[in-house]
Image: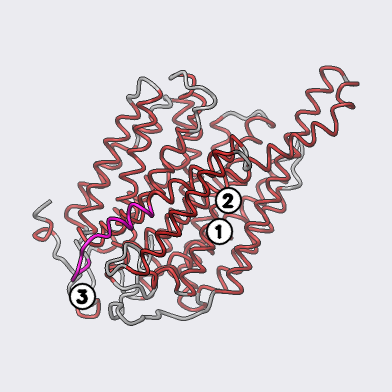
Amino acid sequence: MANDADVAPDISVRSASSVPPDPRRWLALSVIAVAQLMVVLDGTIVNIALPSAQKALDISTADRQWIVTAYTLTFGGLLLFGGRLADFVGRKRMFLIGLLGFAGASALGGAAVNAETLFAARALQGVFGALLAPAALSLITVTFTEAKERAKAFGVFGGISGGGAAIGLLAGGVLTEYADWRWCLLVNIPIAVLAFAAAMPLVRESKAQGDTRYDILGAVLATAGQVALVYGFTKAATDGWSSAVTIGWLTSSVVLLGAFLVWESRTAHPLLPLRVLFDRNRGASYLVSILLGAGMLGMFLFMTFYLQQTLGWSAMKSGVAYMPFSGGIIAAAIVASRLLPRTGPKVLMSIGGGLATASMIWLTRLDLDSSYVVGILPSFIAMSFGMGLVFVPMSNLALSGVANHDAGVASAMVNTTQQVGGSLGTALLNTIFTTAVAGYVTGHIADAARGGEAGARLMQAHAAIHGYNVAFTASAVLLAVATLVIIVMIRDAKDRTPAGAEDHAPVHIG
């Protein structure tokens, strides 16, 4: 990759106002979007294949969680460092390395002959995803510098980021049912190779200028703290919040992340400049990202269980059920990208948060025989549209006004907060669900005993429904808090450019 500058000239030295728009920027966006879709899909496509992979590789029930968490731990834990590498080494270079590494890790996972190999492959996917994702977001930032074009670019990205999870569930159902679970991993290989070949001539290189020394201690503290936090949330789902293991990991995360913040405030070359974190709008968007990531798990996680275990649907049929959700995200992203320059972020995000919250409340009404058309579909449509209205402005707002030097790390923070939120949501909602089911069984066990075996089965089914409804209620609370944060903290301010930022080149995420 030494010849990147010959293929695509470096544009980072000059301000955006002195650089003409890249005539191939929309083609470049399509390549970046495809790569980002691959990363987003990987977060859910494997979930549908998990039962088949567990059976094929003889993975225990206690260990099967590592198919998911091995990826989450490395991806969430290394995103900040990946963002800094993208800034300093070169965003295109890290993008290309991430693509090839992700393809190689996917090949390893698809060929896995035992659980250990699959877990290792998933962890490697997380490592290379942590290089790829912030580089992709930063490339959008430096490629689109005009406000209306940026809004359109983020509309594309918002649709992919929001709808990709649902598309992954559909793709996982199709591949698992009609091919083999291994293709849920192997499908990444041709996508990554094609994106790599297209990116070489289409994507321009850019990187931060000036002092580019690495904050190694900051990287170690941030990564260890995030890994401890995610692992602590994961253990809470299995061992309980009061277990010594859970408390130990969460305490360690607090200590490590606290030490990280202290170090970042004192070092001359911080991994995460606190000016990136403590800007009011940016900080609010990061908090909203955490809450949305946690709350959305209430729909994706438990709705999948409801469709397959309560309604008895196949993996394929369950995947198809999510298609309206994907369509709603894409439609809302298009609308939001057109309205954002005129309305500003607060109005769109407030409406979107309110829609998502109301939709989750609607799901708390589900019963053993609820109709998909009446009980689920309206919520999917409203929630997906609401999320689309939030994702696009949030992506833009989170990085607007960030200096080019900080583009990668600020982008990584958005992904990091989503990963932390998702992990928190999994642990929190699983614990709430389990507690609710146990409480229902305890309160109705006498009635079930009088009904014999049939009564016991019916009681267990109602207990699961009760657990789903309680979990959906908790998700609605998380989404409501996110909406409140938007209303109280977000301030409409178009293209604020603080000292040190590039002229007319606010940063965005993808």
Q: Nearer the viewer, mark 1 or mark 2?
A: 2
Label 1, secondary structure: give it: helix
The residue pinned by badge 2 equals 296
The residue at which mark 3 appears reads as 20
What whole-number distance in Å separates the C-alpha atoms at marks 3 and 2? 40 Å
Q: What stretch is highlighted in magenta?
A: 208-222
Tell whether label 1 touches label 3 (CB within 8 Å). no
Q: List the residue tagged with mark 1.
A: 387
- The three-letter amino acid code for the residue at tag 2 is Met
Q: How many labels does the image show?
A: 3
Q: What element carries label 3?
A: loop
Q: Does the magenta stretch include residue 40?
A: no
Looking at the image, residue 388 lies above or below residue 300: below
User: Viewed as shown, does residue 120 lie left or right of 278?
Assistant: left
Contact, mark 1 vs mark 2 (Cβ under 8 Å):
yes
Answer with the quarter of the image where residue 448 lies: top right
Q: Sort mark 3 into few (<14), some (14-19) or many (20+) by Cα contacts within 10 Å.
A: few
From the viewer's side, name the closer residue of 465 and 370.
465
Which amino acid type corresponds to the residue marked 3 in the rendered image?
A: Pro
Residue pictured at 34% horizontal, 40% vertical: 125
Of mark 3 and mark 1, the one earlier in the sequence is 3
Query: Residue 37 in the image: x percent, y percent?
Result: 39, 48
